[in-house]
């Protein structure tokens, strides 16, 4: 599931900035690169969310759209050969920390009951034949 689309990135970071990041000419953003980065970001987010929620989500919380854009922007800048990406790295680290808290159940996405946390894994169950030897049937030995 995509948590953001190319237009969300353009709205958030600006067309000029994304054009500089995704193309050599810097004229208009390469939407194919934006879509790929957003797809990668969404897959990363799903990896965290699946620990607590049934996927795909029926609605995208606004905070996931923000974090998907930040992760995608980081991935786009990280692919560039040079440049200072400290601010973007901080946004990426913040997004990962947020997702980790969601996966641990410390932050709620505020979703409806049908998207509530996935059921906990059951305990280990073993099945096999009944005991032949035990305290009850070894009394005479």
Image: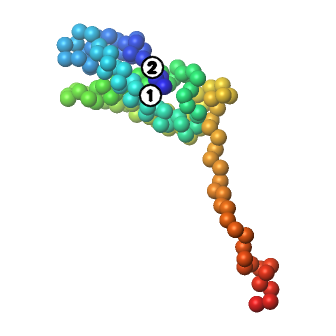
Q: Marks 2/1: CA distance?
A: 8 Å
**Kind of element beneath mark 2:** loop
Residue ID for mark 1: 42
Q: Position of residue 121 (x, y in %)?
A: 62, 47
Residue ID for mark 2: 4
Q: Using the image, determine if residue 102 lies above or below residue 34.
A: below
Q: Which of the marked residues, 2 or 1, is nearer the chain's N terminus?
A: 2
Q: Position of residue 55 (x, y in %)?
A: 55, 31
Left or right: 61 in relation to 79? right
Residue depicted at x 40% and y 12%: 7
Residue depicted at x 56% and y 26%: 57
The answer to whether residue 12 shows anywhere in this view is: no
- Decide which of 43, 139 is in the foreground and name it: 139
The answer to whether residue 22 shows anywhere in this view is: yes
Q: For residue 41, what is the image quadrant?
A: top left
Q: Position of residue 88 (x, y in %)?
A: 34, 27
Q: Using the image, determine if residue 127 lies above or below residue 8.
A: below
């Amino acid at each position: 599931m995509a948590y953001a689309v190319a237009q969300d990135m353009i709205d958030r970071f600006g067309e000029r900035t994304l054009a500089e990041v995704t193309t050599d000419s810097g004229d208009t953003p390469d939407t194919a690169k934006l879509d790929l980065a957003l797809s990668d970001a969404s897959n990363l987010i799903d990896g965290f969310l699946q620990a607590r929620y049934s996927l795909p989500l029926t609605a995208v919380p606004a905070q996931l759209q923000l974090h998907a854009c930040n992760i995608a922007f980081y991935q786009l800048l990280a692919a560039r050969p040079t440049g200072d990406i400290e601010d973007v790295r901080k946004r990426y680290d913040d997004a990962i920390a947020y997702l980790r808290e969601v996966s641990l159940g410390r932050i709620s996405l505020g979703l409806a009951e049908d998207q509530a946390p996935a059921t906990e894994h059951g305990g280990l169950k073993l099945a096999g034949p009944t005991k032949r030897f035990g305290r009850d049937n070894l009394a005479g030995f």
